[in-house]
Image (tube, rainbow, N blue to C red):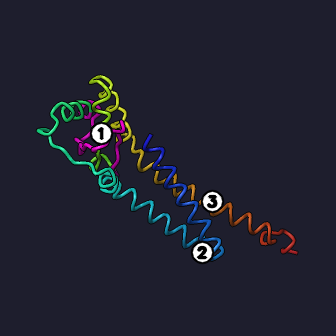
Amino acid sequence: MNQIKVFLLMAGLTALLVVLGGYIGGRGGMMVFFVMAALMNFAMYWWSDKVVLKMYKAKIIERADAPDLYDMVDRLRSRAGLPMPVVAIAPSQQPNAFATGRNHEHAVVCFTTGIMQLIGRDELEGVIAHELAHIKHRHMLVGTIAATMAGAIAMIGSMVRWGAIFGGFSRDDDN
C-alpha cells in the first residue's frame, strides 16, 4: 500500500508543479517546472530509504536486536534470490510495514512495533514476503518513472488545451 501512496504523491506533485509552471510562465514555465519535478522524483527515488526511515523515526536493527524478525527476513530474502536488505523498526503503534530503496543493494524493509504486536509469526512472514516482492520487482523505480511520465502527459495535455483555446494549433494558419 505504501508504494501506491508514494506513486500518487510523486505523480500529484509532478502534475501540480507542471500546472503551476504553466500558470506562472506559460509553456516555458511548464518545461522548467517539469524538469524540477523530474529532478525531485529522481532525488526521491535515490534517497527514499533515508528519507522514509527518518520520517518514521525508524531504527536500523542488527540480528541481535530482533533475532526472530531478522532471521525471517534473511530466510525469505534468500528464497527470493535477493541480497539482505536493511531491516528497521519504527516506533509506531499503527500496524504497518513497507519496503523502499532504489535497488536490490540499497533496499530497506521496515516494520512498526504495532504490526509486530498485532499479528502472528505466519502472518508476519506473509507481510515480509509481500515487502520483499516490492524490492524484487523494483516498484520504486517503476513508480518514479510512472510519476515522471504522468507529469509529462499533464504538461502535453495542458499545452494542447491552451494551444487549442488560443488558436495556437489551428490548421488554418498554414493557408
Q: Position of residue 33 (x, y in %)?
A: 54, 70
Residue at left offset 29%, top offset 22%: 122
**Kind of residue at disc 1:** Phe
Q: Position of residue 156 (x, y in %)?
A: 65, 62
Quarter in which the C terminus is drawn: bottom right
Q: Which mark is residue 143?
A: none
Q: Earlier in the sequence, mark 3 or mark 1?
A: 1
**Above or below, comparing residue 35 to residue 5 in the picture:** below
Quarter in which the N terminus is drawn: top left
**Kind of residue at disc 2:** Gly
Which is more toward the observer, 56 or 18? 56
How many numbered badges does the structure rendering display?
3
Which is more toward the observer, 135 or 5? 5
Residue of label 2: 29
State which quadrant residue 132 falls in: top left
Residue of label 1: 111
User: What range of the chain is rendered magenta?
Assistant: 77-102
In the picture, measured across the screen, residue 92 lies left or right of residue 39, that is left
